[in-house]
Image: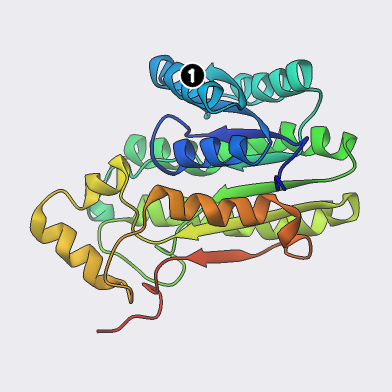
Amino acid sequence: MNLLANRVAIITGASTGIGHATARLFAREGAAVVVAARRQKELDELVGTISSEGGRALPLAGDVGEESFAQALVELAVDRFGGLDIAFNNAGILGATGPVPQMSQTEWDEVVTTNLTSAFLGAKYQLPAMAARKGGSLIFTSTFVGYTAGMPGMAAYAASKAGLIGLTQVLAVEHGPQNIRVNALLPGGTDTPAGREFANTPEALAFVRNLHALKRMATPEEIAQSALYLASDASSFTTGAAMLADGGVSINRV
């Protein structure tokens, strides 16, 4: 039985990595998906793959930091697929790294806009559409960085991703009476293009792997399975959670 049969989902950051894997998984589980990212070519290729696998998908390229784009994504889901049940607000960047005294406000603002403000804008339009369907699941991709661990040089990233957890908790309380569940997914190190930005040498990759209790990084498909849990009725009594899918990086000390 398909876990997301007759559901409609928006997935941002879908051109690569976790978003790409999640879009394919959601479609295989029966959802019609609207996939979003900056790059049209990659989105078109993803839609082609989903279609070849028997799924339904539509692409929309744009900047998640722009309110008009957040609105357009919801309008596309409603107009073409009839509504919205799931939103996986996954788009994000690592952005500028380094000590705060050496960081410009422009660098800070870019990270916060992409990682946190985009989630606010997405939710602003996604929540009313879910309420019109008498419920839904809203998911944000956060991280263990700034939640269970401080990583030197990652202040903007950590602050923006930690902000998503606060947003998650407030929205869960505000919209629980509408049968809308809101959760944050906190992956550990994942083998994605963004992950390889940080672990960009063999030594760095070995260091990141060793941080985890499982002594390896996740595949995007593994994190997609956790997103599927939060999107589906399997998590029907889960809301306001910061759900770790981090390979034990939060508890590992050796």
**34 w.r.t. 234: above or below:** above
**137 w.r.t. 172: above or below:** above
Q: Secondary structure at mark 1?
A: helix
Within 10 angstroms of label 1, few (less than 14), some, or many (20 or more) residues?
A: some
Residue at image x 24%, y 65%?
209
Residue at image x 20%, y 53%?
199
Residue at image x 39%, y 15%?
41
Tell me if residue 171 can be seen: no
| 32 and 162: which is toward the camera | 32
What amino acid type is highlighted by mark number 1?
Answer: Gly
Image coords of residue 54 (percent x, y): 59, 26
Kindly identify which residue carries mark 1.
48
Looking at the image, residue 192 sits to the left or right of residue 19; the answer is left
Q: Which quadrant would residue 253 be assigned to in this image?
A: bottom left
Q: Which quadrant would residue 126 be assigned to in this image?
A: top right
Give the total of numbered labels: 1
Outermost residue, bottom direction?
Answer: 254
Tell me if residue 203 can be seen: yes
Image coords of residue 231 (percent x, y): 67, 49
Q: Which quadrant: the C terminus?
A: bottom left
Image coords of residue 13 (percent x, y): 47, 34
Residue at image x 32%, y 73%?
214
**214 w.r.t. 7: above or below:** below
Looking at the image, residue 93 sits to the left or right of residue 117; the answer is left
Q: By what rule are the colours in the image chosen?
A: rainbow
Image coords of residue 55 (percent x, y): 61, 27
